[in-house]
Amino acid sequence: MLGYWRSHCEFKNWLVSKLKSLISKYKSQISFYADLIEKVYVLDLDPLKDVISPLYSNIGRPANNQPEMFRSLVVMVHCKTHDPTKFVALLRANPVLAAVCGFKDHNHTPGVGTFYDFIDRLWISYAPQKTIRTPKSKKRKRPKSGAKLAPKHPGIVRMLVDQALKGRVICKRPEKVLQQILKECAVKPSSNLGLLGNPNNLTIAGDGSPLQTGASPYGKKLCDCHSQGIYRCSCKRSFTDPNANWGWDSYHERWFYGHTLYSITSADSHNDLPLFLRLVQGSRHDSATFVFSWVELLDLYPEFRFTKALLDSAHDVYDIYRLLKDNDTEPLIDLNKRAGGKVSLPGPTSVDDNGVPICLAGLPMLNWGFNKNRCRIKWRCPNYKDKSKCPQHQECSPSKYGRVVYTKPDWDLRLFTPTPRGSKTWKVAYARRTTVERTFKRILVDYQIESARARTNKRWFWQATLAAVNQHLDAQIKVIKPNILTEIGLRASDSAAY
């Protein structure tokens, strides 16, 4: 059961009082942690209680300091110390850091086991530390330059989309609690501050990034083949990352052993704030991961309306267009040049790779807007201002208005998008897709979670979630501009020096 829970308002008052008592002796340390102090001052953990209370029983010894435990983990990632053992030692040697986390003093901080118990409790699944199996090789051909690894099971995306359209939602995923915490403690406060854009008209961007595990892909031998002179055997071995496998890093064009972190980011946010995180095996194709992530995103954020989805060519699958259409979300997906999709229109016209009709003179027709009521796109003659300039004007159309062609997205969801590919509007909107890549930069580079060298998907997802919370807090303090440093008597020039 949960013990005493200090509210956010009580914590803020206590923190100001505590830092005032420490500033005469530890002014330089308080100045050094100025940004961190503003972060925890803004971080409201009151919603955390409703999220995690079902994970505790109503009997037994009360669990105390639960908001302080989570705040400490956020502080740990901010300090780029990804090992709880090292962070506990840092807390016990640093009175200011202990106060920032909410503890009475550095002699009353939790032990290493307490942190690991808290991490395990919020991961609603048994996470084995190792598994015993035979070693697995890559077994697949190296992709071409710039290409991603093809799905292992052809047709898997169609099957997943069919299940999703039937209303199937995965409710027992182990990271569900952490996704809920990210929403309640980070995403919703950012949305209330206007950092995500209009919640009734949000544009999202999705992509995956490789995470190389700290475990060995070769495992630890349990047999005695080596003593018999057999150095390459297929005997079972012990692997310390049970869920890791071989994947392909298309950016660096190399194989990696580990996991893939998939993020859905608000493209309307110029702070590149993530809305949703998902961790899958390294070999999982982004198109399959997106189907799971999209269904879970809609289930997690029923109060948000997602009107556009910006995705790269790995998501250029007809079934994903079908999935997005079911939610009335406009797809802006880069074409996979290796995939087909050309169609012919009724009459003497055809279309190019971007779905733009080609007139008799071989010129691309002009987009004249999308009629949402009739669900069709209007295209007009490229020489409508002066038809005499067209060599085919006599054979084309006798109308003074010029030839008009309509295309319907229902004919081909991939080619006839509401916003035509190649148009200026499409290019401007699609340019925001890189926001998800900057999210990965913040998580992987700025907060250095890869240096944790984690060995399980539980630890990886915890690190990524804590980095995402920090990212939201970085954006929130720019808007809120908390005055705690002034309250405790620290001048702006003092913190700027550090």
Image (spheres, grey):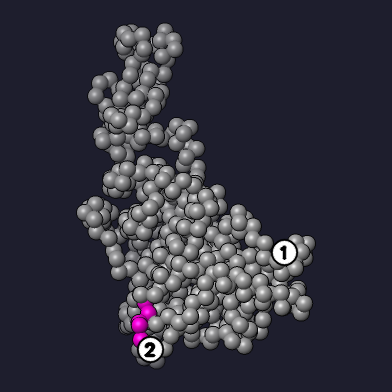
* Quadrant of the drawing holding the C terminus: bottom right
Q: What element carries label 2?
A: loop
Q: In this view, does 325 lie to the left or right of 260?
A: left
* Quadrant of the drawing holding the N terminus: bottom left
Say which residue label 1 marks: 486
Neighbour tally class for label 1: few under 14, some 14-19, many 20 plus, Cα within 10 Å: few
Can you give x and y, in whole percent of width and height, for residue 353 in the image? 36, 34
| Picture residue at 36% right of the left edge, 23% below the top | 379
Can you give x and y, in whole percent of width and height, for residue 150 in the image? 34, 55
Q: In this view, does 79 lie to the left or right of 317?
A: right
**Where does the magenta region start and end?**
55-59
Q: What residue type is labelled 1?
A: Thr
Looking at the image, which is closer to me, 342 or 15? 15
| Picture residue at 27% right of the left edge, 60% below the top | 169
Residue 408 shown in magenta? no
Looking at the image, which is closer to me, 254 or 356? 356
Q: In this view, does 91 lie to the left or right of 402?
A: right
Alpha carbon of mark 1 to alpha carbon of mark 2: how far?
A: 43 Å
Does any portion of residue 96 appear in the rendered image? yes
Looking at the image, which is closer to me, 97 or 169? 97
| Above-or-below relation of 361 to 158 | above
